Amino acid sequence: MEFINAMRKRYSTKKYDATKAIDKKLIEELKEILVLSPSSINSQPWQFQFVTNPEVKKQLAAASLFNEDKINECDTLVVFNSIYDVAVFEKQIKENLPQSALDYYNTTLVQLTPDELRVWFDKQVYLSLGILLAACAQMEIDATPMEGIEADKYQEILKMDGYRSLFAVAIGYRHDEDRNQPSHKPKSRLAQEAIVKSI
Ligand SMILES: Cc1cc2nc3c(=O)[nH]c(=O)nc-3n(C[C@H](O)[C@H](O)[C@H](O)COP(=O)(O)O)c2cc1C
């Protein structure tokens, strides 16, 4: 499918068909696509958890506010975590990045407070959300990005250390009765002239 058509067709799914599973090969491709996401200085301050274990998925669903049913009925929940502990980040970049990137960290990023640095980490993680949603659109996998999660509870359930959950994405296939699909509810966007300027 042409990418423009994939973007026209994608939408945030509100009701999943729990009987439809995503091919395991496509799940493996999505994992690699996330690994290939770009980030500033190739910092990669993230961790992605693909949750299919029914018990864990149920616990996370219960900690996801109005998103509970979507998570219970989707095929897989992808949890996006950002590094919280700056020492974890420093160790990771020392072990993996070239000197030029370390120099940028040591001269520029190091001037940020830990909280400012975490905001910078989070920006990188959001980029990978865009990549996943675009890939799902192209692969005709339905998806729902969800900030509506209780991060503290996710941290406990997933026993995370040094990371915190920012958001999660339900992936699977829509239920025929999903009233949010474009055939029922046309896409709503600001006018292109209002937000895209050609100079
Ligand atoms: C970062 C982010 C967080 C979102 N959180 C939720 C959420 O918790 N639950 C939900 O049903 N939709 C959520 N959405 C979906 C948006 O409401 C949706 O993308 C927007 O209304 C545009 O509609 P569309 O994705 O169907 O084109 C989120 C979207 C983004 C990008």
Image (tube, rainbow, N blue to C red):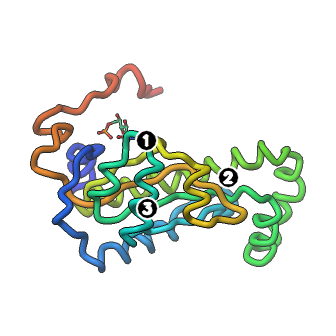
Judging by the rendered image, the residue that carries numbered circle 1 is 65
Label 3 near ligand 1 (CB < 8 Å) = no
Other residues around mark 1 within 10 Å, as few (<14) / some (14–19) / many (≥20): few
Which quarter of the picture shows residue 81?
bottom right
Q: Residue furthest top?
A: 194
Q: What amino acid is found at the position of numbered circle 2 in the picture?
A: Phe
Q: Is residue 36 left or right of residue 118?
A: left
Q: Which is nearer the N-term, disc 3 or disc 1?
A: 1
Per the image, label 2 sits on a secondary structure element best described as helix
Q: Describe residue 82's horizontal placement relative to residue 101 as left or right.
A: left
> Percent x, y for residue 39?
61, 58
Residue at image position (44%, 47%) is 64
Rendered residue at 85%/44% (across/down): 113
Do callouts 3 and 2 mark residues in contact (Cβ within 8 Å)? no
SS at mark 1 in the image: helix
Foreground tag (3 vs 1): 1
User: Which secondary structure lies at badge 3?
Assistant: strand
Residue that carries the numbered disc 2 in the rendered image:
121
Hey, what amino acid is under mark 3?
A: Val
- Residue denoted by label 3: 78
3D distance between C-alphas at marks 3 and 1: 16 Å
Q: Earlier in the sequence, mark 3 or mark 2?
A: 3
